[in-house]
Image: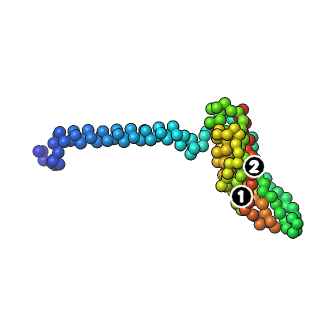
Amino acid sequence: MQPGEMDVGLSDQDRRRFWSLFWLLIGLGAAVLFLLVAVAFASGFFERISLPAPSRHSRIEQASPQPESPPPAPTLDTQGRSVTTIDWRERPAPYYPDRAQKAGIDAGSATLGCAVSTEGRLGPCEIKSEDPAGMGFGDAAARSALQARVHPSTINGVPQTGRMQFTVRFRLQ
């Protein structure tokens, strides 16, 4: 042994075994990770949690950003209170569903029922219907509704929670 070297008690054969086992375990770990990702893709897991990229050739009705509109004009109810109804401030702007685009479907719609907060946020939303069914129009509309904003209904100027139902129409061009 040379000065400055330390004997760790492993022979050359033991070191080779150690590194062989080390690289074998690294390879097995990579193979297991690959299989897990492959199963996740095959089951559609990543499609459910990621937003699809917008297509250059898609257009969604109601998707263009609109300037903020003033709150609706109040009316008087039977008790003489000043009442306004829910009105859009920013409409939903969904992406066209990849599943529908790949299937060659050029139009669809989804009807949602959403809770409305006193701040004008929507959610949680329930998909009431989608046409055609199973093509992702309901999910795309529901995701976009979380970004939309409304003027909540008011009574005597005080915002109220509520529910609203609306339809988002999709058209691929």
Q: CA distance from mark 2 to mark 1?
A: 12 Å
In the image: residue 148, left or right of residue 14: right
Q: Nearer the viewer, residue 4 or 144?
A: 144
Q: Nearer the viewer, residue 30 or 5?
A: 30
Q: Vertically, is 105 above or below 90?
A: above
Displayed quadrant of residue 134 = top right
Instruction: Identify which amino acid the numbered label 1 is placed on.
Output: Val
Q: How many marks?
A: 2
Image quarter (top left, top right, bottom left or bottom right) of the C terminus: top right
In the image: residue 96, left or right of residue 77: left
The residue that appears at 65% across and 55% down in the rendered structure is: 124
Instruction: Identify which amino acid the numbered label 2 is placed on.
Output: Phe
Expressed as whole percent of the image width and height from the top left, the position of residue 156 reads 81, 67
Circle 2 packing at 10 Å, graded few (<14), some (14-19), many (20+), is: few
For label 1, the residue is 116
Q: Nearer the viewer, residue 75 or 1?
A: 75
For label 2, the residue is 166
Where disc 1 sits, the SS reads: strand
